[in-house]
């Protein structure tokens, strides 16, 4: 039976707990340094809190150490890995192979998508090395995933929801070129979310000041069963900069979808973690931050991958404007709109936002005068009632247990068995007199079933045998508390603990060892040379500006997006080359139509 894992992002300990309470099987979180989201670092003390809470439910904690490292940072990285291993972190998500040359403890290693896990040969190399898990590129289709699964043994992780990088992961250098902030160092300036114009060789503008590289957000919730069947082990939600309300909502939604798959295939699948999740809301990803949704390349090359009008969250369509007067809008609503909701609309140039002060039937009294034409569609990008409900954090996760009680020579005997089959039993030290009232049997069962603020929920209590003892309430509570403490200790003893086996030194590396390997330290260069690479070039951060270098490689194609696909002969009148232009820079676009890739190259 395969275990399916829902992997949620966590910017901090609070978000980690929210993810776990709403159904995550694992969380990935940054440590004090070297994570690919520089703004989402956490102290060792906070990591320890997350590990302690997660492990109670057999949830896993992965630390992101997925930036490229300079030589002077390697010793600190080694110390950090040893510290988090001591804390009980389950795995490292890594990009820089220089780490593999350090004296690491046997902590599980996951190959970050930043290692450019699109090329099947690259994936097979990492698999043969001995990585426990490989995080696949977002651009892979279902058929490509199936092909990779047939040729690899490692666990496979795949993004199913959240923001999309327009470039192949690990292959974007545009931020560093424009600002000196390297995406491979966790400092991305998000140049893809900026406005750009597209010009042809004659200077004619095909697109003027639009967000031509700003992809919509990924949503593969309708395809989880297909991905599980294809061999995906871990279903990953993007969003390590997101707040607890976003992570709670999206995690709960995907957890429920995975539970449906498990319920429909009990002989094939189970979930990684334990616990019954009770959410205090009905999850709906459209009610959290989103730029509109796409299934990306899951089933081929779709149209309309970007929202050229805005890189911001549009949210859910809720109403159409019928009349506008001062600060009042008369609308035809398809959803209930509430006081303090945030709405937005396109004015032909930009996405504009308004706040609803008061709702009076079909009239919205806004916080300012508005000038909106009848027929304008309104979207809700801030659902006040929903966010307020999420902020209460009322979702809970409890481990189901059954308790059996009885009397043995005057001692109270207790046994607890949890949903994972972990079983413990205890015997009271003191003896108790026989109960004179037959109702004591029911009283004992009722009292034992009250697990209160513990991690457990008791679904069944049974008192066996004819002999019923009278146990005072305080003693009964103490016996139950001791029983649950024993169960917690036994669960930890039975918890699966990953151990990384030594990597295989003899695996040959047969792909080019050029600058796109992102080698910026000596140990990374040694790693590739030891695996058979010849001349290992320095990465972009070390080699500086080279004319004509590609600063972005993407499966997204502007020609296809604009309805000008060359393969389909729709680009008549276009004079090549095309250029991507904004006040920060000018770049040449190159189209590899045979492989369906687009590259953005520097001019000088």
Image: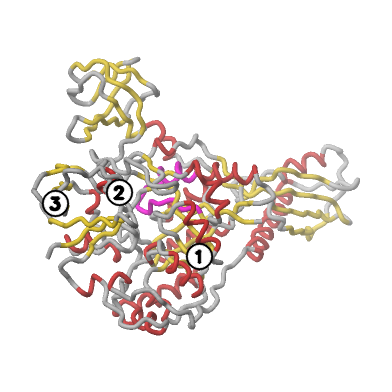
Depicted 348 relative to depicted 395: above or below: above
Give the alpha-carbon distance from disc 3 to disc 1, as whole Å: 39 Å
- The residue that label 2 is drawn on is 567
Q: Give the mark nearer the N terminus: 2 vs 3.
A: 2
Q: Which mark is residue 505?
A: none
243 in the magenta segment: yes
Q: Marks 3 and 1: which is nearer the front?
A: 3
The picture places residue 558, in percent across and down from the top left corner, at: 25, 48
126 in the magenta segment: no
Q: Marks 2 and 3: which is nearer the front?
A: 2
Q: Which residues are magenta?
A: 235-252
Q: Residues within 10 Å of mark 3 (few under 14, many from 20)?
A: some
| Quadrant assignment for the N terminus | bottom right
Front residue of this view, candidates 482 and 98: 98
The picture places residue 519, in percent across and down from the top left corner, at: 31, 75
Q: Which mark is residue 581?
A: 3
């Amino acid at each position: 039976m395969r275990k399916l894992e829902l992997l949620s992002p966590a910017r901090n300990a609070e978000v980690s707990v929210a993810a776990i309470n709403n159904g995550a099987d694992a969380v990935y979180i940054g440590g004090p340094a070297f994570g690919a989201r520089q703004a989402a670092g956490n102290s060792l003390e906070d990591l320890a809190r997350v590990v302690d809470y997660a492990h109670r439910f057999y949830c896993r904690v992965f630390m992101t150490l997925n930036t490229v490292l300079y030589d002077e940072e390697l010793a600190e990285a080694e110390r950090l890995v040893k510290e988090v291993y001591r804390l009980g972190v389950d795995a490292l998500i890594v990009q820089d192979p220089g780490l593999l040359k350090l004296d690491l403890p046997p902590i599980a290693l996951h190959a970050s998508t930043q290692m450019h896990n699109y090329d099947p040969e690259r994936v097979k190399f990492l698999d043969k090395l001995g990585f426990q898990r490989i995080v696949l590129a977002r651009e892979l289709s279902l058929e490509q995933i199936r092909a990779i699964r047939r040729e690899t043994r490692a666990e496979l992780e795949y993004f199913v929801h959240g923001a999309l990088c327009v470039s192949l992961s690990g292959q974007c250098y545009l931020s560093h070129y424009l600002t000196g902030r390297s995406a491979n160092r966790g400092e991305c300036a998000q140049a893809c979310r900026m406005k750009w114009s597209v010009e042809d060789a004659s200077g004619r503008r095909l697109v003027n000041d639009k967000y031509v590289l700003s992809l919509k957000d990924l949503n593969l919730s309708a395809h989880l069963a297909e991905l599980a069947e294809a061999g995906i082990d871990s279903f990953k939600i993007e969003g390590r900069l997101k707040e607890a309300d976003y992570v709670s909502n999206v995690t709960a939604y995907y957890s429920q979808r995975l539970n449906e798959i498990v319920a429909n295939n009990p002989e094939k699948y189970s979930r990684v973690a334990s616990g019954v999740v009770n959410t205090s809301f009905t999850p709906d990803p459209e009610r959290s931050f989103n730029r509109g949704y796409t299934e990306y390349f899951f089933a081929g090359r779709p149209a309309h991958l970007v929202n050229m009008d805005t890189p911001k969250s549009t949210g859910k369509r809720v109403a159409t404007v019928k009349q506008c007067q001062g600060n009042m809008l008369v609308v035809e609503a398809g959803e209930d709109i509430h006081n303090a909701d945030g709405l937005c609309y396109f004015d032909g140039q930009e996405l504009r936002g308004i706040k609803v002060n008061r709702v009076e039937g079909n009239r919205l009294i806004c916080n300012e005068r508005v000038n909106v034409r009848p027929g304008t569609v309104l979207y809700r990008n801030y659902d006040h009632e929903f966010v307020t409900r999420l902020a209460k954090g009322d979702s809970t996760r409890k481990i189901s247990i059954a308790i059996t009680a009885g009397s043995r020579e005057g001692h109270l005997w207790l046994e607890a068995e949890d949903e994972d089959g972990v079983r413990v039993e205890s015997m009271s030290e003191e003896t108790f007199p026989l109960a004179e009232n037959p109702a004591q049997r029911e009283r004992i069962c009722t009292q034992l079933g009250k697990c209160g603020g513990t991690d457990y929920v008791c679904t069944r209590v049974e008192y066996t045998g004819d002999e019923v003892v009278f146990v005072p309430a305080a003693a009964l509570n103490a016996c139950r508390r001791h029983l649950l403490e024993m169960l917690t200790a036994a669960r930890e003893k039975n918890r699966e603990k990953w151990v990384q086996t030594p990597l295989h030194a003899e695996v040959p590396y047969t792909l080019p060892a050029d600058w796109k390997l992102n080698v910026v330290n000596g140990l990374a260069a040694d790693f590739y040379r030891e695996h058979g690479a010849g001349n290992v070039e320095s990465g972009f951060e070390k080699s500086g500006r080279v004319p004509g270098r590609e600063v972005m490689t993407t499966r997204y194609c502007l020609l296809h997006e604009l309805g000008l696909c060359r393969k389909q002969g729709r680009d008549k009148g276009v004079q090549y080359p095309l250029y991507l232009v904004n006040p920060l820079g000018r770049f040449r676009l190159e189209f590899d139509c045979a492989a369906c890739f687009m590259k953005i190259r520097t001019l000088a």
